[in-house]
Image: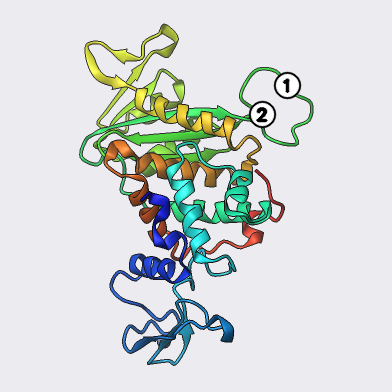
């Protein structure tokens, strides 16, 4: 036995039963009328084109499957392949390229690309409680990656032509939250920090002037001086940004090795993917199978059409 021999990766009925158990943990809900009573299963019959997982609502007589209202809705792919794709993306620390996904699942590159973006949507967390709410430490740092498109001839130096992200790590819960930033300046950084970090938090940054002013809004703000080779304050070992640096090292290796040609308009979804895996990592007691189940819970209410995903497949 291996994880990959689980029936829901191979048997369509088992896949539906598994997904239903997660999405409808308290029993099926009719997406047409919201009814929960007298819902009956219709026996699948491929010859008569009766789909797997088909249900009939006793109240409105409507038919539905667990796919409705989820990222699976407009897809013709078998549920088994969706579950394989979710597992691959959840268990690979640096991500899986659309080319690799396409080869493994035996689907076209375009299908794999779209599949991966919809899974990233499922990984995207909605409203998070502010980081550092119990007075804990929150690390903040920026990263500059790749190169924006259509900027004309390459200009040397500076970060103007790079894509920019700001990442926050709540050291108590281990969660990461990344925002893609158009202009990295004190105003945008302050807006992100005040929206996502509790006043009681102790903010940890490097010496960058971006954080000086907004840092005063929190219970504490300590900065290590990277330019002077200070990574941990020896008088207080909690003063460091090594956690967020560790996050960036995974993300940068992934972006370089797996998602080389990520367009800026899709970057927020890649960041959601890295945030998700990091926030649900093994060090926090979450194994690959559990991580995939957590992602599966996020499929509801996140349909993503080709148009919203950007019509031409990239990266
Ligand atoms: Zn109904």
Q: In the rendered image, which quarter contains the C terminus?
A: top right
Place of residue 60 in the rendered image (x, y in percent of width and height, measured from the top left): 43, 92
Place of residue 208 in the rendered image (x, y in percent of width and height, measured from the top left): 45, 20
Other residues around mark 2 within 10 Å, as few (<14) / some (14–19) / many (≥20): some
Q: Point out the quarter of the image occupied by ligand 1.
A: bottom left
Circle 1 is placed at which residue position?
155
* Labels 2 & 1 near each other (Cβ < 8 A): yes
Image quarter of residue 131: top left
Circle 2 is placed at which residue position?
161
Q: Nearer the viewer, residue 315 or 304?
A: 315
Left or right of 15 in this view: 160:
right
Residue at the image position 57 percent from the left and 61 percent from the top: 304
Left or right of 195 in this view: 303:
right
Q: Where 111 falls versus 19 (above or below)?
A: above
Q: Nearer the viewer, residue 237 or 110?
A: 110
The secondary structure type at the circle numbered 1 is loop
């Amino acid at each position: 036995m291996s994880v990959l021999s689980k029936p829901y990766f191979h048997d369509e009925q088992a896949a539906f039963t598994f997904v239903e158990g997660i999405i409808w943990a308290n029993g099926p809900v009719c997406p047409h009328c919201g009814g929960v009573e007298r819902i009956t299963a219709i026996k699948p019959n491929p010859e008569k084109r009766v789909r797997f997982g088909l249900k009939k609502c006793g109240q409105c007589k409507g038919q539905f499957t667990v796919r409705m209202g989820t990222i699976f809705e407009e897809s013709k792919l078998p549920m088994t392949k969706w579950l394989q794709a979710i597992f691959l993306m959840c268990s690979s620390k640096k991500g899986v390229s659309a080319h690799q996904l396409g080869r493994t699942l035996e689907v076209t590159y375009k299908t794999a690309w779209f599949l991966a973006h919809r899974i990233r949507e499922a990984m995207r967390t909605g409203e998070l409680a502010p980081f550092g709410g119990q007075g804990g430490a929150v690390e903040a740092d920026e990263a500059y990656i790749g190169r924006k498109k259509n900027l004309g001839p390459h200009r040397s130096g500076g970060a103007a032509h790079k894509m920019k992200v700001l990442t926050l790590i709540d050291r108590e819960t281990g969660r990461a939250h990344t925002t893609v930033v158009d202009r990295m300046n004190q105003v945008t950084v302050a807006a992100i920090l005040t929206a996502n970090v509790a006043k009681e938090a102790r903010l940890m940054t490097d010496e960058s002037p971006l954080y000086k002013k907004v840092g005063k809004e929190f219970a504490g703000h300590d900065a290590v001086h990277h330019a002077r080779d200070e990574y941990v304050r020896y008088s207080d070992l909690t003063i460091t940004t090594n956690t967020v640096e560790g996050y960036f090292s995974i993300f940068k290796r992934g972006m370089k090795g797996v998602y080389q040609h990520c367009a800026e308009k899709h970057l927020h979804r890649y960041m959601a993917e890295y945030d998700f895996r990091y926030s649900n990592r093994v060090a926090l007691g979450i194994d690959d199978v559990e991580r995939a189940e957590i992602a599966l819970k996020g499929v509801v209410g996140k349909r993503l059409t080709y148009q919203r995903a950007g019509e031409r497949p990239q990266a």
